[in-house]
Amino acid sequence: MAQFTVATVDQALMAALPVRDSALRMLSLSGKCVIVDEAHALTAFSRRILTRLLHWLGSLRVPVVVLSATLPGQEARELVYSYLAGAGHRRRDLMARADEFTVPYPGWLFTDAATAQVALIPADARTQHAAAQQRTVTLRLRPAHYRRLNGSARRARTGERLARIAAEVAPVARLGGCAVIVCATVADAQDTYRYLQRFLKWPAGPQELLLVHARFPGRYLERALAQVRTGLGPTGPRPERLVVVTTSLLELSLNIDADLVVSDLTSLARLIQRAGRLWRFEQTWRNERPPGIAPRPPWIRSRGPRLTVVHPVGHDRTTLLPDAWAATEHPYLQHATAHLLTLPGHHQITLPGHAQHLVELIHQSGRPAAWSDPLAALHAQYLGAERAEEHTSSVHLVPPHDRVASLSDLHRQKLTAAQAATRPHDRPGRVLACYRHRDRPPTLDAAGQLPLPQGPHLRPAAIRTVLQHCVPVPSAWVAAATQAHHGPEAWQQHPLLADLVLLPHDPDRPQAARLGRHQLYIDDELGLVHTETA
């Protein structure tokens, strides 16, 4: 009920689910302006909930702003239709005016809830904006064989993924510059970091190589992201040399500029997001360069902005995705992106001008004419998976506003807040390293300076400290947790601490905690390290 609130979109989506106090959640959104950022990051499951929420917000005449850089046109129109339908306009009439509801790119579209009239960004303003942000990015697809490092000290062979990445960033270590390496999974990021740390020479030491991913304790992650925002931000001070190894964590809501970007193969929409971090402030710095920003190194300046995509292939040189990458996004998006980047005319893209066109090439509702039979089959599977997610999501939605006669209609299903899902996957578990000492109580740190908060009355500051040391993990990793992995008795009665799984660590003899087939250990340098036994 606060006047201003910032949260993940899940908090707002819960208002469209039949959970306790959902009407209170909807009331808290009314009378405000609701801003949904990075809408393209939502899956079909979450977008279906968002459309129902927009339907209700339209009926309440709540102003809504939806922001996205790579949202397909049809999905954008669906959001507009849902909002206006909630405001009382017939969906059939709106769909007949589909061309009017096409959002210009780059630009904006405004629709009035009362009249359904449309206003667009003026053409001259759009042209000026595009010109001010325009840059041409070279896209290079580099085939590589995927092989994990698996903790060994081996040197990757020529043509392996790790060797490809090392070759791309080796000039940064020698000649300077700022590079970002975006890996498909946390495990790949950890492997990449260890390999570059071992086989590249860093003139000023290990601080020139930074690992950032979501499986670090929150306290470390906040510091690391602050370092990235400062070093690669618009005002600096910018380091002479920095390589950031990360995951998709860095492509959302970070206003940074990199001289060079290397990315594992991913969907074209994500590649465009990552390309948007290449030379992002070039135009601004040409007009007025802040004191902390040195000119780009000459070797970078001569090549221009370049995005290298590491393409996993088999022995026949066709796309061969590692099993671990299947959980990141549907294989069709990666296969289609690899195919598109091999076609003539797609080795260079101009941003923002080409972005929407490329996104639409991948997200087509019918069979793309240029796709081969295997790729078309993957496309059909992708569309089927999207429809299945939408159907599953629809099962638990509250009814549209015009089908509700009383509050009881909002709670026809018995769904608790713990059972409600705003995303298609299981709710992640959370783990907390617990360091056990011989002569004193367990602590949150290896040095023994932060005792594990206990007692019947937990202070907010103590709870906040515990949460800053937690790490989110897939629920399957902690499914085998036993009573020995539960926190103190007082935690079991607290809604923010009851589900925490403790990982007992010995500060003098590092050893992974075992939960069934999963072994978990929090390393100060790598974050949460996970291994799985057969």
Image: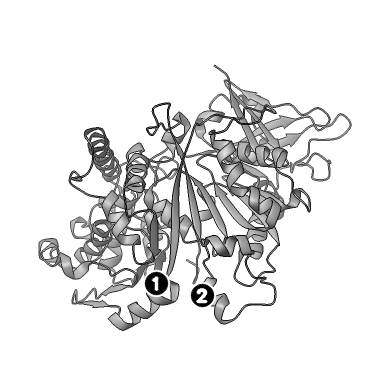
Q: Is residue 308 left or right of residue 64?
A: right
Name the spot of residue 236 as percent of width and height, x first: 66, 69
The amino acid sitting under disc 1 is Cys
* Cα separation between marks 1 and 2: 32 Å
Q: Quadrant of the C terminus?
A: top right
Write the residue at 55% across / 81% down: 287
**Numbered tag placed on residue 136 in the rendering:** none
Callout 2: 10 Å neighbours few (<14), some, many (20+)?
Answer: some
Q: Disc 1 vs disc 2: which is toward the camera? A: 2
Q: Is residue 469 left or right of residue 273?
A: right
The amino acid sitting under disc 2 is Gln
Q: How did the renderer colour the structure?
A: one colour
Q: Is residue 389 left or right of residue 187?
A: left
What secondary structure is marked by label 2?
Answer: helix
First of labels 1, 2 by sequence position: 1
Name the spot of residue 387 as percent of width and height, x first: 24, 42
Name the spot of residue 294 as percent of width and height, x first: 67, 70
What secondary structure is marked by label 1?
Answer: loop
For mark 1, what is the residue? 33
Q: Is residue 10 visible?
A: no
For mark 2, what is the residue? 283
The residue lying toward the viewer, choosing from 126 and 505, is 126
Q: Is residue 313 placed above or below 210 in the rendered structure?
A: above
